[in-house]
Image (cartoon, rainbow, N blue to C red):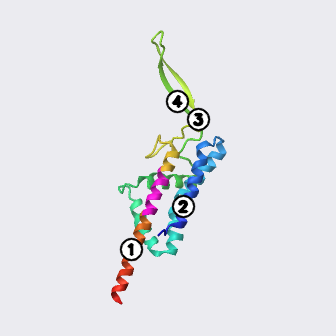
Amino acid sequence: MIYTTHARRVLSDVEAVRAKLENEVGRTEWRLYWVTAVVLVRAVGHVLTKVDGAAAPVVREISNELHRRWKNANAGDSIFLDFIEQERNSILKEYEFGISEGPIPVLAKMQNSVTGEFFEQQALIGENIYRPMWSGAYEGEDGRTLLDEAISWWTTQLDCIDKESVLRLARIRQRGKKCD
C-alpha cells in the first residue's frame, strides 16, 4: 500500500521540471526551472510529514525518525544534507545559486604538432552542456545529475517509508487481535 501519495506527486513534478532543464538555454527560464526544481525537491519531505503524515500518523513517525538520520552528516545521506537542504537554503534565504548560470570557460594546454611548442587555448563549454556546482561537497558535479540523484534518493526513501508503514501497522493490528 502507498502511504506517501502526496510526496510522490511533488516528486513527479520535480521530474517534470528536471526534464525541462535538459534542453532550456534561456538564462532566465533555466534559472527559474532550477529554483522550482530545488524548492520542490525539498518540499517532498515537508509534504511527506505534513500531508501524508497527517493522513497516516505512522508515516509522520517514520519520516521524523528518518529526518533525524538524514540531518546527520555521517549517516550516508549526503545528497539530502549537502545538496537538497543546502541548495534550497541558499536559494530561499539568500537567492544565491551553487550552480553555474552560463557558459563554462575551459583552458586547454596544447602542443603545436609542427614546432612542438606548448600553448594554452581558452574555449567555452556551451550554455547547457555542463552546469557544474561551484562549491560544497558536490563542487564540479553537474547540478542536473544531482537532481537525478535526489529524485532517486527520494524514491528509495518513500519506498522504504511505505514498506515500514505496512509492517508497523500490521504489528499494531496483530497486537490488537491478541487482546480480543
Q: Nearer the viewer, residue 170 or 74?
A: 170
Extent of the magenta region = 149-159
Sequence-earlier tag: 3 or 2: 2
x, y percent for residue 174: 36, 81
Question: In the rendered image, which residue does mark 1 sit on?
Answer: 168
Tell me if mark 1 has few (under 14), some (14-19) or many (20+) residues whose alpha carbon lies within 10 angstroms of its own.
some
Sequence-earlier tag: 1 or 2: 2
91 in relation to 132, above or below: below
Q: Residue at x 58, y 48 (%)?
A: 19
Query: Marks 1 and 2, how far apart in space?
Result: 25 Å
Q: Nearer the viewer, residue 54 or 140?
A: 54
Query: Marks 4 and 2, how far apart in space?
Result: 35 Å
Looking at numbered disc 2 in the image, what kind of residue is underneath it? Ala
Question: In the rendered image, which residue does mark 2 sit on?
Answer: 43
Tell me if mark 4 has few (under 14), some (14-19) or many (20+) residues whose alpha carbon lies within 10 angstroms of its own.
few
Label number found at residue 177: none
